[in-house]
Image (tube, helix red, strand yellow):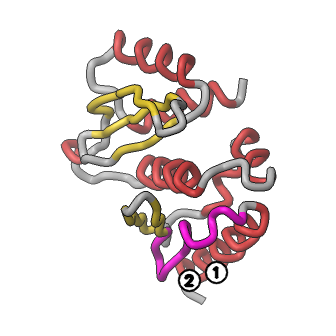
Amino acid sequence: MNVNLQMMDNNMMYFNEWVKHNESWRGKLQIIGNNLVYQGNGNQDAIDISNYYLPQILENPLLREQIQMKNHLQAEDIFRVIRVNVLASEESDVVDEQAYIADVVMEQDDMEQYFLVVEDNLGHKFKITQNIELILQTYQKLRNKNTNILLEDFKKEMEGLWHE
């Protein structure tokens, strides 16, 4: 069996189990072909997961716990987490195409909850809803070291925070 086909079969199996625990994802998050597709707020977004093993995100104990809790994570949040992981794991042959953080903005949703929007130089936006102050402090620490913060470096710092 083709390695990518086997990986997608495994991805589908894990994804279906996660949806059982997170019924609010139904109709908003699905795997179509090789893509994880999010549909919400009148928008549709997709990321190719054919070269990414979804269970890798379970290595993060916080995410593992939140996925297992019934309807704790919103479909958009898990989609963005997976997208960040997929993009960070892709190897770029061209240095100019490496993703780095272009902007970090705090916003407020309709329920007056604050969240961060991290945008990379390739136009991808990531929504962060938890540990906002700690993430902003970490971002500023990295920014003081280097004005161009690679998305991969930012991801490693965030994983370090979640494992503490």
Asked which secondary structure carries label 2, the reply is helix
Q: Residue 131: image x %, image y %?
A: 60, 25
At x 54%, y 31%, the residue is 113
Q: Does the magenta stretch include residue 9?
A: no
Q: Quadrant of residue 104?
A: top left
Viewer-side residue, 161 vs 90: 161
Magenta stretch: includes residue 35: yes
Indicate the quadrant where residue 28 lies.
Answer: bottom right
Q: Which is nearer the eye, 115 or 148?
A: 115
Residue 67's place in the image compared with 146, above or below, is below
Q: Where is residue 139 in the image (x, y as percent from the top left)?
A: 43, 20
| Image quadrant where one finds the N terminus | bottom right
Place of residue 141 in the rendered image (x, y in percent of width and height, measured from the top left): 44, 12
Per the image, the residue denoted by label 1 is 9
* Real-space Cα separation, disc 1 to disc 2, in angstroms: 6 Å
Mark 2: amino acid: Leu
* Front one among 111 and 71: 111
Query: Would residue 76 be found to the left or right of residue 94 on screen?
Result: right
Residue depicted at 38% across the width and 35% down the height: 118
Residue pictured at 30% horizontal, 39% vertical: 120
Q: What element carries label 1?
A: helix
Q: What residue type is labelled 1?
A: Asp
- Span highlighted in magenta in the image: 23-36
Residue 94 disc label:
none
Disc assigned to residue 5: 2
Residue drawn at x 51%, y 36% is: 128
Question: In this image, 40 relative to 74: left or right?
Answer: left
